[in-house]
Amino acid sequence: MTWLWFFAKIGVALGIIFSLGPVCIMGDRKISAWIQGRVGPNRVGPWGTFQPIADILKLMMKEVIVPDGVDKVLFLGGPLIVFIAPVFGYCVIPFGNQIGEEKLQVVNLDIGLLFIMSVLSVGVYGITLGGWASNNKFSLMGSLRASAQLISYELTFGLTMLLVVMMSASADPLKSASVDLSKIVLHQAEYGWNIFGGATWWGLPSGLIGFVLLFTCAMAENNRLPFDMAECEAELVGGYHTEYSGMGFAMYMFSEYCSMILSASLIVTLFLGGWSFPYLTDPADHSFLAGVISIGVFFTKICIILFLYIQLRWTLPRFRYDQVMSLGWKTFLPLALVNIGYMAVIGVFLEKP
Amino acid sequence: MTFTIYELAAMQPALLVMIAGLLAVGLDTFVPSKTRIAHAMLCGGGVIAAMAALGSQLYYQRTAIHAFGNMLVLDDMACFLSLAILAATGLVLISSDADTTRRNIGFGEYYGLIMIAASAMMMLVASNDFMTIFVNLEVLSLALYVLTGITRKNPRSNEASVKYLVSGAFATCFFLMGVAFLYGATGTFALSGIREALALGLDSSMARVGLGMVMVGFAFKIGAVPFHMWVPDVYEGAPTSTTAFMSVTVKAAGVGALIRVLLIAAPMRSDLWADLLWWMAVATMVVGNLMALQQTSVKRMLAFSSVAHTGYALVALATMRSTDETFVPEAAASALFYLLTYTFMTLGAFSFLIYMGHELPGKDGTSEWQDAETLSDLAGMADRRPWAAAMMGLFLLSLGGIPPTAGFLGKFYLFAGAIERGHVTIAVIGVMASLVSLYYYLRVIVWMYMKEPMIADEKPHPSVAVVIALAGLATLLIGVMPGAFIAAAEHSIAVLR
Amino acid sequence: MLATVAVVVIAVVLIATAVAVVVSDNLVHSVFWLAAMLITTALLYVMLEAPFLAAIQVMLYTGGVITMMLFGVMLTQRDPGSRVPSASEAPGWAAPVALGLGATLLVAIWTTPELAALTPTPSGDAQKIGHMFLDRYLIAFEALSVLLLAGMIGAIVLARKGDA
């Protein structure tokens, strides 16, 4: 029975990623068309909905070209590694409330947040590796930019996560901090979402700022427009995946959407109450129906965040590279520091010991 | 565990030094002038304040302060060595203005790094736990790697810095592995805890290997044979002011920490380490002196001589276990006293090299500062710079161990103690080695006094003259009236429990 | 039993990757092997029931340090494909010394009886580790920040533009 649950949970987690991935690709094209006043893909299937499948088929048919002078092992290994991060990261995301004794989370790690941080940091390698192995100046530039950007924004990312941990600690009856994601969600379900300051009224500004920071950093970590420094067709041809074709390129593209989904899940989990919604879910209700509803809530929230992502991509102008860096180091990092400083100091003064 | 504000007093001297250094780094923003007098004054203030704090600890407080769960202890030995380190730091700071302006280093960070290194050394000699020992050892090494390479356009300096970094990292591996083994064998990082574990009979082979590796790590840092390979290259390549600073302070801090480890963690198991130290001391004395014989560069010669002097200091530690198997911890006092004398004479000798520096035409028309290095740089200087040359002669005689200088007393105290405890062989080897060393020390004096000058464009800086005078004064003072210093050294060891 | 097999496998991979770091002719490959080695070390920590340490290991070393090293290598290498011969100049005596040292360590570990009484039970609990840092090892923890500061000042001094 335990094993059955385990595989079911893996199924749901992978299902979220792999079903939302193509939907994202489709959505990206449809929404962009909508924003730009075009029609968008409409030939394959009803309203063009089979377009992603056609895309994938096309990419699978194509020859994988390995150019001369590339580092073969690393060149082929890059796309694989970049794929690992989002899939691994999904292990610890709680995508629903408890059903009976089973938490709807593939593995319930005590160190959930840290696990995600470390997995995301490994993801850089795929990009760096691919870019370097291509033996192409543009690819190298792209991969270096990508990793520089990732490192820069990871700091703010981490500090914002720390904020969430602090908020969760102040909601905890024992006032003990935890990096366990399911606990963080449970606290939000019981005492209020972190974006609105968690359990306390004075956390409100902190929560709002933290949400904006995490949202933006996640966008930067995914190398999405307006932070697409790694690809930027205008300057670097195609960035780190210039030399990739066929499945190699497909993996890079697909993993970008996958990590987008992971980021959206993370944002939902950390700031938007995870699977909880007032009057709709009850943390104490462990019935099957409540579990399914909580999964639905979680799924809906992810979709909203993903829509925001895609919409922002097609409405905001691109940054210049130096602007990306100065935004990360000179604005976000100090802001995040002040934010957790506020939370810590106020917490000491206003909270009953 | 609760900490009281009182415990901060244990690290107050080190903190004062560090704060002064960090302020000096920040001062660059506000004092954009070419001369760095303000930095030197600020750092000097920090050094004097720390000395005052140590003095008050020694004369008014008297009892040792055990702070932060006994991880730091400010006892008499820590005060003694901290004062020696601070004296050396102060002297280097006085002459640093000459160096920074001439070499156009001009960085406030230069002062900051010196002060951070000094404060880490002071914490190191007060460390009572492998955790603090390791961290402070790393802080001081890191600062010194950078100070070695601080003349960035000089390829020799860069090379020295990288060599120092690589060999230092290697030494750190040994040290860390040793600490891990000791932890595995005894279950604690605290020196006193390790002693208790050893007393309980936990002297497994793991603990022995751990202790050995820790000693190898220390030997690397203080430059004892066979882990001395980096010393000549690094000392020669580094700017002379850095060489002067690190040659004296690192030895004081490293040997001090080693004494504390041996006397607190493993006093009753001296059979585990005494023989190892004996061989190391002999090898260091012999190799250091023989290599120094062959050098034509005075700077390199002084580097090898510093290796040899490490060997002399180790003699005191190796002979703590007397031949009739009794353990005499008081013997370590002679090592402390020797380190004190060594501080002033070596600092003085290196400062003389800075004093005799001259400008070399560089590649692109600019001139580049070059400290005196070879014998020919110093030839005939007795005529033109009689006072400075006389002082250099004093330092060299002191290094060679000629009365009435400090070096003589240091060696006398050391070897007499060794013979008293029955270690005649090592004492004889030591005396023979010092006799050999006289040859190369006197050779420099001969060149200074009996040759014709070969360079005519040396540009002495008055601040370096002050350093030379002060170091000379200290060398003579310790040589003429050593009583107070020896008493202080003996007292520091006596209270070390 | 399963745990023993896992540890052995991890150990073999660990040693293999470590050797690969040293013998690889290509600097970038070396760095990637190093990353692989550090991740394997993290797995070892997991087997030793220290998941917190494992996560930190991957986060800091693989995510931070190695990425920095990659930057260094990629930006300073003139020819990205250039070979760096890694053979030691003195393998003749280096190998026996290294093997001897390794044998000594192994013998030391083998012959030491297991400790039960003295060693406190290792804890992978993040909270306990945090308390240790701010309590028992406070001073070492604070001294580490000085270490980082010194490193930062040093890096800026050596890398910045300007004279000298």
Image: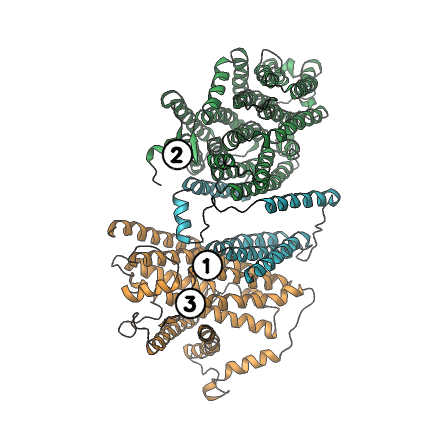
Chain colours: A orange, B green, C cyan
Q: Position of residue A112 (x, y in %)?
A: 43, 61
Three-letter residue code for mark 1:
Val
- Please name which of the two marks, 1 or 2, marks the residue nearer to the observer: 2
Q: Is residue A316 visible?
A: no
- Mark 3 lies on a secondary structure that is loop
| Up/down of C61 relative to A304, above or below | above
Pointer 2 residue:
B67
- Mark 1 lies on a secondary structure that is helix
Three-letter residue code for mark 3:
Ile
| Up/down of A44 relative to A68, above or below | below
Three-letter residue code for mark 2:
Ala
Chain holding disc 3 = A
Q: Is residue A50 visible?
A: yes
Instruction: Kindly indicate the quadrant of the structure image that contains residue A267.
Output: bottom left
User: Marks 3 and 1: in contact by CB < 8 Å?
Assistant: no
Whole-number angstrom distance, CA of label 3 to CA of label 2: 44 Å
Classed neighbour count for the residue bearing mark 3: other residues with Cα under 10 Å, few (<14), some (14–19), many (≥20) = many
Pointer 1 residue:
A324
| Up/down of B284 relative to C98, above or below | above
B444 or A278, nearer to the observer: A278
Q: Position of residue B478 (x, y in %)?
A: 52, 15
Count of picture labels: 3
User: Marks 2 and 1: in contact by CB < 8 Å?
Assistant: no
Q: Determine if marks 3 and 2 fall on one subunit.
A: no
Whole-number angstrom distance, CA of label 1 to CA of label 3: 29 Å
| Up/down of B270 relative to C21, above or below | above
Pointer 3 residue:
A93
Q: Determine if marks 1 and 3 fall on one subunit.
A: yes
C115 or A53, nearer to the observer: C115
Chain holding disc 2 = B
